[in-house]
Amino acid sequence: MNKIERDPSFSSRFRKLFEFATMSEVGKRLNVPHATVRNYYHGRLPAPDILIKIANETGVSLTWLLTGSGEMYPTAAGGRDLGRALESLIESIVDRRLAEIERDKKKPAKSTLGFDLDIAVRRHNDPKLILNEWYEFEGLKPPKDFGVVFFRGWETFTTDEKVEAVRDARRVLDRSKKK
């Protein structure tokens, strides 16, 4: 009966690598069962393919992971530390996103609950009913004449073509109301 090899120094390096993650989170990142991760936390060495997966997922040096020697993270091209490069990249992404949020705060708010033309076309399959519903949704009085020219061949249109035909008709109707 073979005794499972355990390496307490590997366990401490593995814990350091995933210090703030739960065993379940580590398992999900590595696509291995929770029980397998628990074995790694207790010093069991992973199979070579899992070691490579750990290195690829985290950017850790395999030499450091297996032996504890050398840098934890290999130096990137140009002599920059990979950890610092990642921190810088994350910082710039966060700064850019915060700037977008600030810009969005200054823009006037738009209603996110608009009329869903696709649903109306699927529900009614009648351009006049759809346009009436759309105008009523916006609190407007629908016109009496819809101009059937937009809807010739309606039954042969795809759903997307029906949506576009109704949109086109609406644009023309709105322009004619302005005159």
Image: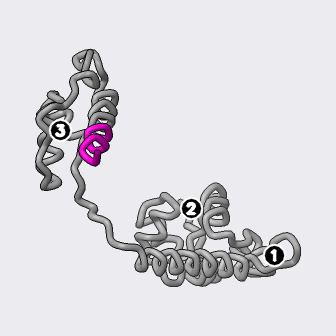
Above or below, comparing residue 33 to residue 140 in the picture: below
Identify the residue at the far front of this view. 179
Q: Which quarter of the picture shows residue 67?
A: bottom right
> For the residues marked 1 and 3, what is the alpha-carbon distance in whole angstroms?
63 Å
Q: Quadrant of the C terminus?
A: top left
Q: Amino acid at mark 1?
A: Thr
Q: Which residue is mark 1?
A: 75
Residue 123 percent across, percent down from the top left: 14, 35
State which tag comes first along the sequence, 3 or 2. Answer: 2
Q: Of discs 2 and 1, which sits in the foreground?
A: 1
- Left or right side of 56 for 32: left
Main SS of residues in magenta: helix
Above or below, comparing residue 144 to residue 148 in the picture: below
State which tag comes first along the sequence, 2 or 1. Answer: 2
- Magenta stretch in the rendered image: 171-179
State which tag comes first along the sequence, 1 or 3. Answer: 1
